Amino acid sequence: MVRSSDADGWQLHEQHVRTLAVNILAGSLSASYMIGNLLYRYVTDVPDFTQAIADDRTRIPTAVEESLRFEAPVTFLFRSALEDTEIGGCPVRQGDHVMMGIASANRDDAVYPHGGEFRLDRESPPEHLAFGAGPHLCLGNHLTRMVGKVVLEEMLDLFPPGSLELAPGYEWHCVAHPLEYGPESLDVVASGAS
């Protein structure tokens, strides 16, 4: 893709190539944070998460979507306005930079009833913004969703509910980046292990 060109010789600009490289790295980090969020919830079983998906594995896709909505691994996106507009009554001029709060939008009670709660009983909820929207939709969204599903399925097969616990003294610390959300590390032990 980096070396491709069209019939007129047009190629991606160096800035776009750099952006693609950053997106590949950032995309893998986002998937890692999503997995960390899911596994923390799995180990701590809050709120009855692990038992609920163990009892009904068809809830796994909902669990992944709810994690992406409620614990979006990327919390903000930045955009530049292409034309004068208005957002929530606030004028935005062409060229202005706008910061979109994904975490806030994904918890909007007007869109998601009980938006501030992680729930496995959401039926056909509106699409969340964890992967952006429109022409800026993350290309890796299908892969990330699949990874989340496979991780939960494998965890259920390998570590039944209650067989893992947080390591003694473990404290959850968010990654040290203001635009991302997930555990910096996740230290766990299998029950009965020393």
Image (tube, helix red, strand yellow):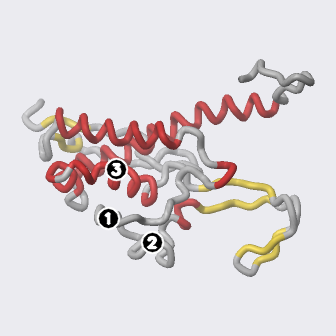
> How far is the residue under mark 3 from the one under mark 1?
12 Å
Q: Determine whether, in the image, residue 26 is placed left or right of residue 126.
A: right
Numbered circle sitting on residue 61: 3
Tell me residue 110's x, y (percent): 50, 78
Q: Nearer the viewer, residue 163 or 194?
A: 163
Q: Is residue 132 above or below residue 88?
A: above
Instruction: Using residue 98 as the reference point, say whether residue 77 is left or right of it.
Output: left
Image vertical order of residue 63 relative to residue 144, above or below? below
| 3 or 1: mark nearer the eye | 3
Kind of residue at badge 1? Arg
Q: Return the disc, 1 or 2, that comes first in the chain's sequence.
A: 2
Q: Residue furthest top?
A: 3
Q: Nearer the viewer, residue 181 or 108?
A: 108
Q: Secondary structure at mark 2?
A: loop
Instruction: Return the residue at label 1.
Output: 119
Q: Residue furthest bottom?
A: 89
**How much space separates mark 2 and mark 3, taking CA atoms?**
17 Å
Q: CA distance from mark 1 to mark 2?
A: 10 Å
Residue at the disc numbered 2:
112
